[in-house]
Image (cartoon, rainbow, N blue to C red):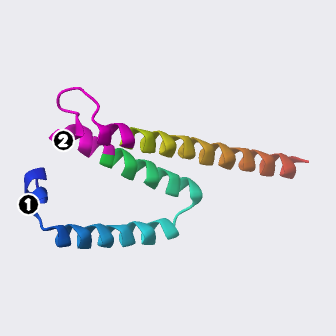
Amino acid sequence: MNAEGERKMSWEQQQRDIAAHGEEVRSIAARLTPERRADLLLEVTQGIYNAVKIDSPEGGGLDGRDGPERMGLAAVVDAAQDHHHAVYTRGLAARDAEENGRAH
């Protein structure tokens, strides 16, 4: 469905869709490793940011300016990127420590 059709959907239907997708994401995330959850978080946040930047005129992206929504989402994406980096850094450090422990 295109963005215009999505906007015409009733508020109640939007709420049902959001709740259903939220439950779906939760179910998927429960089965993932911390690294893959960080990947999922980054993918979802970047997807929402890009929708606002590219697909939503009120997001301030089409005219090259950062609207309030886009600026707020940029902070969320930055936090997701920081989390992603931290999770992968911890994972690599743990694997290195494990491998070094086995080598001795």
User: In which quarter of the view is residue 56 placed?
Assistant: top left
Of all residues, the one furthest to the top in this rendering is 64
Residue 48: x, y in percent? Answer: 31, 49
Stretch of the chain drawn in magenta: 49-72
Q: Residue furthest front?
A: 68
Residue 8 numbered tag: 1
Left or right, residue 98 beside residue 18: right
For the N terminus, which image quadrant? bottom left
Amino acid found under the numbered disc labelled 2: Glu
Checking the image for residue 58, the label placed there is 2
User: Could you tell me which secondary element the residue under label 1 belongs to?
Assistant: helix
Which amino acid is tagged 1?
Answer: Lys
Binning the other alpha carbons within 10 Å of mark 1 as few (below 14), some (14 to 19) or many (20 upward) gives few
Most extreme residue toward the right, as rendered?
Answer: 104
Q: Where's residue 3, x and y in %?
A: 13, 51
Image coords of residue 30 (percent x, y): 51, 70
Distance from disc 2 to disc 1, alpha carbons, whole Å, reads 15 Å
Q: Is residue 60 magenta?
A: yes
Q: Is residue 89 magenta?
A: no
Q: Main secondary structure of the magenta part?
A: helix
Identity of the residue drawn at 38% across and 41% down = 72
Secondary structure beneath disc 2? Answer: helix
Instruction: Identify the residue shown where x is 25% and y is 38%.
Output: 53
